Every structure is written in structure tokens, then in C-alpha cells.
Amino acid sequence: MSLEQSSKKENNIFDIKKSAAIQLNALKEKAIEEINETIKFDYEFTLGSFAYEYELTAPIFTENIELEGALHLELSDKKGEPGIQKINYKLTEDENIALLTGANSGGKTTLLETLTQISIMAQMGLPVSADYAEVKILDEIYHFSKKRSLDAGAFESFLNVFIPIVTTNSEKLVLLDELEGITELDAAVKIISTFIDMIKETNSYGVIVTHMARELMNYTDIRVDGIEAKGLDEHNNLIVDRTPKMHFLANSTPELILKRIYEKSDKDLKQVYGRILEKFR
């Protein structure tokens, strides 16, 4: 192929590309508009399907946190099964922090997680998993999950993280799940009671799951709520109303958990759990 033929071929290819570009440019604005409409439809359809599947409700923004018929998202597909209960709970401007006491495996941790889910979803502008929900707009949300124990280094690290949280003037939700293991009992009571007072002094809200309610009540004036287990059913499941009773100090009733394990254990283990249960009689 000669140089002239090669140049002519390249010119023809350029003309074709130029013509295609001009035609596509004429369609560009309409294509972008249609893509945006498709994305918007997909977002709204997905959000609507999510809200419909999980039976979500639009929250109302107030100065309180009030839930009626709230349910953890992971339990939504188990509605109607034994032991799955919707819960009610409330924090107000006057009672903005509470201790949560009661039965082991009674739903205290699940309640904290449900509060976290609903608060975050509401902040994002999403409907929430409750029949009715009043939610406060917050600057920060903190959820400290259950820890077995902390050594000296971890204890210091926890204080370094937590102290700035309670000393800022931002409006926040602080959820603490059984922090008794942060240090020895007497020190833990003094530390947590101080945290409680500092949270109460700000326009913030908090729920603390604890088995030290009696000790904490000696150091701070705080509302105490409780989830009470009434016994075991014929299948050795806890009989419990998972909606906390407000202004009620509930017992942890570890003997019920031991009895449930005892009934489900083989002969050798039953002897061990039986000896432990004898101490509760």
C-alpha cells in the first residue's frame, strides 16, 4: 500500500469516528438523563422493597427516643416464631439515661443493638424497624459491646477512648453493654457512675446494661429498668417479657440458665450442673 493510499484510509477512519462522535454527542444529554432516571428508580424501588419486606416505618424526629413495636432487623424474618417479641422502650429529656438490668439471655443486648440500628437508620433518612418511632437527631452514636475482661493496658485504652466522648458538648447516644470487666468491681462502679453523671449533664442519651445496678444506685441518681424472667416453659425456654419494665430492678436469674442447660445435658454433665443448682436452693 502506497503512502497516499495509507493516508487516505486514515482520513476515512477519522471521518467515520468524527461522524459517530457528532451523532453520539447529540444523544449524550438524553442518555445521561435516562441513566439518572434509571438510577433514581432503582434506588427508590430498592428502598421501597426493603421497607416493605422488613415492614419499616418512617420515624418522627423529636427530643425523645420512643419505640413501640421495635424489632431487631435480624429477627424480622422470624416473626411469629416462639420467643420473638417486639419491644417498647423510651428515653426522655428528663430521663435521658437508664440502667438496664435483668435476665441472662433476656434480650438486653438485642435491645441495645435495636436502638443502634434504629438511630443510625433514622439519621440516614431511612425508615426504621418499629411500628412507631420517635428519634432524636444526634451528633454521635457510640455502642460499646460486651467484653469479658480487660487487662491493665486495655483498661487504659478504654479510658482514653471513652473520656473524650463524655466530656464533649455534642449530643450523643451512648450504649454500654456490661462493662463490669473493665476493672475490679468497686473501681468499675465509681468509674461508670461518673460517666453516667457526665452524660446526664449533656443533652445526650444513654442505656447501660449492667449487673451492678444496686451498687451504681449508691453513687448516682438514675432510672433503672428491668427485663424479668418468670421461669422456663415445657421446652426449657425462658418465659420472659422482652420489653423492659421502667423503674424496675430485675434479677439476672442465672439459675434459670443453669436449669435449662441441666435439662439439655447428658447424664454425666447433669450431675455437675445439678451440684451447682443445689447452691441456689
Image (cartoon, rainbow, N blue to C red):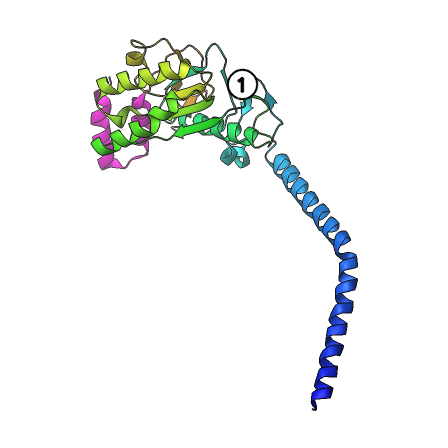
Q: Count residues near mark 1 (Cα–Cα under 10 Å), then give few for <14, some for 14-19, many for 20+.
A: many
Instruction: Work out whether residue 10 can be spotted.
Output: yes
Residue positioned 31% across, 25% down in the render: 179
Which of the two residues, 164 or 275, is positioned nearer the viewer here?
Answer: 164
Q: Quadrant of residue 250?
A: top left
Examine the rendered structure and indicate whether residue 182 appears above or below residue 89.
below
The image quadrant where one finds the C terminus is top left
Q: Quadrant of residue 163?
A: top left
Which of the two residues, 163 or 109, is positioned nearer the viewer here?
Answer: 163
Left or right of 186 in this view: 11: right
- The secondary structure type at the circle numbered 1 is strand
The outermost residue toward the front is: 4
Residue corresponding to mark 1: 66
Residue positioned 74% across, 78% down in the render: 11
Where is residue 44 drawn, in percent x and y? 67, 40
Q: Quadrant of residue 187?
A: top left
Q: Disc 1 marks which amino acid?
A: Glu
Which of the two residues, 205 or 249, is positioned nearer the viewer here?
Answer: 205
Left or right of 247 in this view: 45: right
Where is residue 71 drawn, in percent x and y? 52, 28
Where is residue 49 drawn, in percent x and y? 64, 39
Residue positioned 60% across, 31% down in the render: 125
The image quadrant where one finds the N terminus is bottom right
The outermost residue toward the bottom is: 1
Residues rendered magenta in the picture: 253-281
The answer to whether residue 20 is magenta is no
Instruction: Work out whether residue 110 can be spotted.
Output: no
The answer to whether residue 274 is magenta is yes
